[in-house]
Image (spheres, rainbow, N blue to C red):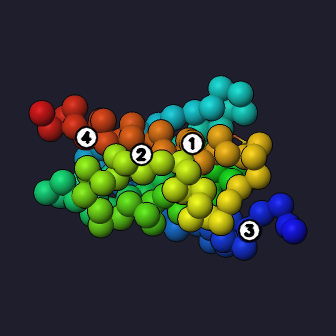
Amino acid sequence: MPLYSAKVMDHFRNPRNVGSIENADGVGEVGNAVCGDIMKIYLKIDNDIITDVKFETFGCGSAIASSSMATEMIKGKPVSEVLQLTNKAVTEALDGLPAHKLHCSVLAEEAIKAAIEDYQSKHK
Ligand code: FES
């Protein structure tokens, strides 16, 4: 069995929603101190719905695939639902990641949550 699923390879080779959003409503940046990879998520939020999302990931292929899949999973969803997104759900949507690459999907969950926290701190 190949190390990476076809879905991981697809999202790594053709990542969705790459880039940044000018005047984003929420921005979250997280990193992993061990591998040094960094992920940044930009959100556009209207009426508590994620209307647009982009990411910049300076990291490994699994981190890029996780960010790409996670952005697809949260677009059009309400903030309350997006806050429930787990790295496990992202990993499952990718048809799995090798055990030593699971931390890459954690970055996606954390970056999205950080971006929502940023949004909520500005809209109290
Ligand atoms: Fe660090 Fe993948 S090896 S995020």
At label 1, the amino acid type is: Val
Check whether the beta carbons of the residues at disc 3 and disc 4 lie within 8 A of each other: no
At label 2, the amino acid type is: Ile
List the residue tagged with mark 3.
5
Q: Residues within 10 Å of mark 2 (few under 14, many from 20)?
A: many
List the residue tagged with mark 1.
106
At label 3, the amino acid type is: Ser
SS class, disc 4: helix
Q: CA distance from mark 1 to mark 3?
A: 18 Å
Check whether the beta carbons of the residues at disc 2 and disc 4 lie within 8 A of each other: no
SS class, disc 2: helix
* Left or right of 63 in this view: 89: left
Ranked by sequence position, the earlier of labels 2 and 4 is: 2
Ligand 1: which quarter? Answer: top right
Instruction: Name the residue nearer the viewer: 41 or 90.
Output: 90
Instruction: Name the residue nearer the viewer: 109 or 54.
Output: 109
List the residue tagged with mark 4.
119
Residue 120 placement (x, y as % from top left): 22, 37
Q: CA distance from mark 4 to mark 1?
A: 20 Å
Q: Look at discs 3 and 2 and give the one toward the viewer.
A: 3
> Can the viewer see residue 23 in this picture?
no
Residue 50 placement (x, y as % from top left): 28, 59
At label 4, the amino acid type is: Tyr
Residue 112, disc: 2
Instruction: Name the residue nearer the viewer: 22 or 78.
Output: 78
Ranked by sequence position, the earlier of labels 1 and 3 is: 3
Residue at 76% x, 52% y is 98
